[in-house]
Image: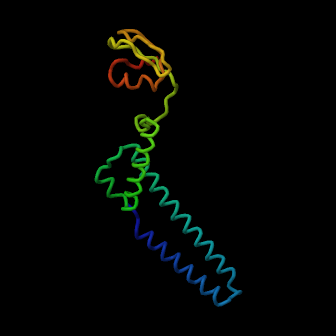
Amino acid sequence: PLKEDALRECFADMRELFTENQNDVEAHMETHATTVHARHVALGQIRRCLLAYLYQRLMVARDMRWDFGTTLDADLRENLSDQEQQWLRRYNGLLADYMTSVGLDLTRFRSPPKSLYVQVRCVQDYGDFETEDGTVIVLARDTTHFLERSQCEKLIHQGIVEHVTT
């Protein structure tokens, strides 16, 4: 779960450091220039730590999307803040829009294919199959073919051909 108490404590420390710096600068205390600088450096370090923590949480939420799909279990969801859940919903929407626009389900495989072409063997008689470039291939039972992965994925899922692994 989000460590809200630690975040509030960091924000309070930052407000205090900023106020002290502002008071010293407004009082024209040149003798405190090193103190002002030290506080300013501390502010930057706290800010960087907060951003790193929040960024890491978003990356974990993003990875959960890729690992578990669009719907998360209740126990996973309750570990996310409302803002993180809202971010995840927007991320899901953007990802879905992108996949629709390119006509490809990126979530189907977690790792990229090793090659663009795969060897497939026909499990059943299918008949003529026209590839994207217009070539017609006769898919008959027990024949093997070397096809582009993108063109034969649907046939594999339908059970018409199977991927031959060597």
Q: Quadrant of the N terminus?
A: bottom left
Residue 54 in the image: above or below residue 43: above
Residue 84 in the image: above or below residue 98: below
Q: Which residue is rendered at x = 42% and y = 22% of the image? A: 152
* Left-right relation of 92 to 32: left
Q: Residue furthest right?
A: 30
Name the foreground residue: 65 vs 150.
Answer: 150
Name the foreground residue: 97 vs 4.
Answer: 97
Residue 71 drawn at (x, y percent) = 32, 47
Q: Which residue is rendered at x = 45% and y = 55% of the image? A: 58
Q: Residue furthest front?
A: 134
Residue 26 drawn at (x, y percent) = 63, 88
Q: Which residue is rendered at x = 65% and y = 81% of the image? A: 35
Name the foreground residue: 63 vs 131.
Answer: 131
Residue 122 in the image: above or below residue 31: above
Q: Which residue is rendered at x = 47% and y = 22% of the image? A: 132
Q: Residue furthest bottom?
A: 27
* Left-right relation of 116 to 80: right
Task: Give the total of numbered labels.
Answer: 0
Residue 74 in the image: above or below residue 32: above
Residue 47 drawn at (x, y percent) = 55, 67
Residue 21 drawn at (x, y percent) = 61, 82
For residue 108, what is the image quadrant? top left
- In this picture the colour scheme is rainbow
